[in-house]
């Protein structure tokens, strides 16, 4: 059944908003519960983010595909998963949702609605980390989808993000919309606006690399192949 663009956009807005509210809110909570212990704060932040990703993808995936991420939308359109005319509307609501989620988190913890982040995250190691984090995320998503194992996407993405929090120097933003949203909270998860262009460029590069790798590793969608086999058998 075809789902209207309006319903899909609402799902993308809500999903991205809740995702960023979780990232920012759990970061604030971690700072308050474990002050001075950065490692424990990061662990708490990572677990909360992974947990909410399972729920959001499982719940909203059937509506919009549960992208919540402009580079996921772009690569999905590349492989024909959504109409290319829907790319920009998806991007708009994802960014709006990310900003709304950060504002919501600030308000829930008694902060000003907008507190511009001051944490500068920059440098070649950070940017390389975002290339790796984004490429890996997209390989997980589209490798599973094109391999006919879409039911594994929700838990796999969650586990990947929790792991990537720890093995990348950038703590794996891997999402331009989330990156922009996190500039609106000067808390544990915040990123200074001046650091955003470097992050987004690295994320775009990671997405392009992932698109090429997916094309090589999974050149055909397994479901398409299965249908083709069934058709051939029926015509014999």
Image: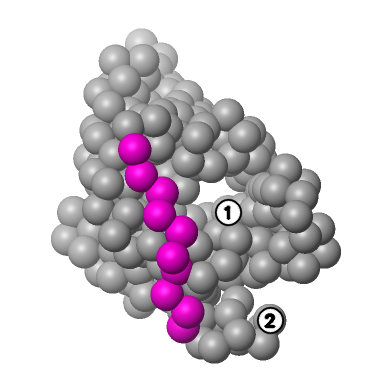
Q: CA distance from mark 1 to mark 2?
A: 26 Å
Q: Residue furthest toward the left?
A: 85
Point 33% across, 64% down: residue: 193
**Label whose residue precedes the other's in the sequence (1 or 2):** 1
Write down the region rendered in magenta.
114-123
The quadrant holding residue 208 is: top left
Horizontal and vertical percent position of residue 68: 44, 58
Residue at mark 2: 109
Point 32% across, 54% down: residue: 195
Please tell me whether residue 111 belongs to the stretch shown in magenta.
no
Give the left or right position of residue 111, taking residue 31 as reference: left
Is 20 above or below relative to 232? below
Residue 67 in view here: yes
Looking at the rendered structure, which numbered label has been put on residue 155? none
Point 35% across, 68% down: residue: 95
Is 151 above or below relative to 100? above
Q: Secondary structure at mark 2?
A: loop
Residue at mark 1: 57
Horizontal and vertical percent position of residue 18: 57, 69
> Few, some or many C-alpha atoms within 10 Å of disc 2 (few <14, some 14-19, many ≥20)?
few
């Amino acid at each position: 059944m075809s789902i209207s663009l309006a319903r899909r956009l609402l799902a993308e807005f809500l999903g991205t908003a809740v995702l960023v509210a979780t990232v920012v809110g759990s970061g604030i909570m971690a700072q308050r519960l474990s002050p001075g212990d950065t490692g424990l704060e990061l662990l708490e932040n990572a677990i909360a983010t992974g947990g909410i990703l399972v729920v959001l993808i499982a719940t909203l995936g059937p509506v919009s595909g549960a992208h919540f991420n402009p580079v996921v939308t772009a690569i999905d359109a590349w492989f024909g998963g959504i109409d290319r005319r829907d790319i920009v509307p998806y991007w708009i609501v994802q960014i709006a949702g990310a900003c709304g989620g950060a504002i919501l988190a600030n308000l829930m913890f008694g902060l000003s609605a907008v507190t511009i982040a001051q944490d500068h995250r920059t440098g070649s190691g950070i940017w390389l980390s975002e290339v790796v984090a984004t490429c890996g995320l997209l390989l997980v998503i589209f490798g599973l989808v094109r391999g006919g194992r879409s039911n594994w996407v929700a838990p796999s993405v969650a586990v990947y993000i929790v792991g990537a929090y720890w093995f990348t120097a950038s703590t794996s933003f891997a999402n331009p919309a989330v990156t922009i949203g996190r500039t609106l909270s000067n808390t544990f998860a915040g990123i200074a606006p001046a650091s955003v262009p470097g992050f987004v460029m690295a994320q775009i590069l990671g997405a392009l690399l992932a698109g090429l790798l997916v094309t090589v590793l999974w050149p055909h969608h397994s479901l398409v192949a299965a249908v083709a086999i069934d058709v051939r058998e029926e015509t014999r």
